[in-house]
Amino acid sequence: MSASLVNKSVLFIIVTTFVTLQLKVGVVFGSFLDTKVTLYNSLLVPITIHCKDKNNDDGFHVLNSRDLLTIKFKRAFLIPKTLWFCSFKWENEFHYFDIYVQKRHSCTHCHWMIRTDGLCLNTYPDLFCFPWNNRNNFTPIQKRMLISEEENRQF
């Protein structure tokens, strides 16, 4: 009978520990997975920005010159598959850019500067600049989302 009581006590401790860890995982990993991307309009004209991923749409935002836009999301935990991309429209220009690719970016708060020829990632003291996305290199999901956006956009 005492062996049975020990087994029940051990089982109780294991189950209690498991439940406690499950409840805390949102607290521990919740902030650990938080990611911010800040976009800075360095152009002299307003820009309309539309950012989204496969499941989330951040909507349309207009940034005047020298304005900032911060997008917040959670990146994937085990498999690095998070991808956020944006469209940028100003005057007669229309471009796309992957602002966060989890396999490529290690920042938890990425700072991008928007320029006419692409975006620059500010990793103080360095600035890494990238050209706009080539439309031929999009994933099928991106292509579907962008085609529907192009059909709905107004000039």
Image: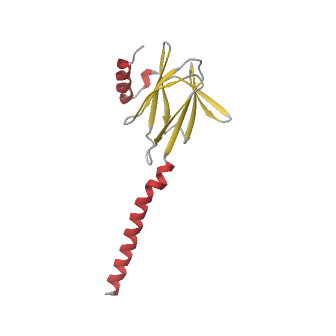
**Which residue is the extreme one toward the right?**
125
Q: Is residue 99 above or below residue 11?
A: above
User: The N terminus lies in which quarter of the figure?
Assistant: bottom left
Image quarter for residue 130? top right
Q: Residue at x 34, y 87 (%)?
A: 2
Residue 68 lies, in percent from the top left, at 56, 30
User: The C terminus lies in which quarter of the figure?
Assistant: top left
Front position in the image: 69 or 78: 69
Residue 64 lies, in percent from the top left, at 55, 23
Residue 27 lies, in percent from the top left, at 47, 55
Residue 5 as seen in the image, left or right of residue 131:
left
Residue 5 lies, in percent from the top left, at 34, 82
Q: Residue at x 35, y 79 (%)?
A: 7
Front position in the image: 23 or 132: 23
Q: Is residue 13 above or below residue 135?
A: below
Image quarter for residue 17? bottom left
